Image (cartoon, rainbow, N blue to C red):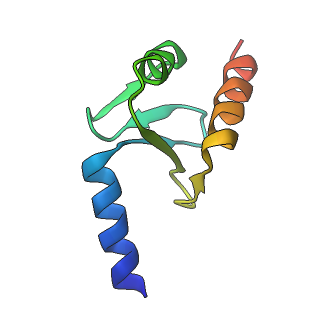
Amino acid sequence: SLSSQYVIREKIENELRVIKKHGSRRLYDTKDSCYVAFLELGIIIADGKEFRIFDAKTNLHFQPESSAQHVLLLATQTK
């Protein structure tokens, strides 16, 4: 149900670092309320912190394996 989706989303946001990917390929860290660079996301990954990437427009969640691929793809596109 719609209300259970909001409860799940709230739980995820409280326990995990939520990164929102905007159409401009910018990544927004909702926990720290700031944009993050790919280097900073690499540090989050290296530190073993849990995170999820959501598309800001569709609110769809990228799976962990596709998140890593997606971050690498975005990093190569920004050069």
Q: Position of residue 38 (x, y in %)?
A: 54, 19
- In this rendering, the answer to whether 11 lies above or below 51 is below
Extreme bottom residue here?
1
Q: Quadrant of the C terminus?
A: top right
Of 62 and 65, the residue lying toward us? 65
Image side of residue 39 versus residue 49, left or right:
right
Q: How many marks?
A: 0
Of 40 and 79, the residue lying toward us? 40
Q: Position of residue 75 (x, y in %)?
A: 67, 20
Q: Position of residue 3 (x, y in %)?
A: 33, 83
- In this rendering, the answer to whether 40 lies above or below 73 is above
Q: Quadrant of residue 10?
A: bottom left
Q: Quadrant of the N terminus?
A: bottom left
Extreme front residue here?
48
Image side of residue 1 versus residue 30, left or right:
right
Q: Residue at x 42, y 25 (%)?
A: 48
- In this rendering, the answer to whether 62 lies above or below 60 is above
Q: Residue at x 36, y 80 (%)?
A: 4
Image side of residue 5 versus residue 21, left or right:
left
Q: Position of residue 35 (x, y in %)?
A: 39, 28
Image side of residue 73 versus residue 15, left or right:
right
Q: Quadrant of residue 76?
A: top right
Of 36 and 69, the residue lying toward us? 69
- In this rendering, the answer to whether 36 lies above or below 8 is above
Q: Quadrant of residue 71?
A: top right
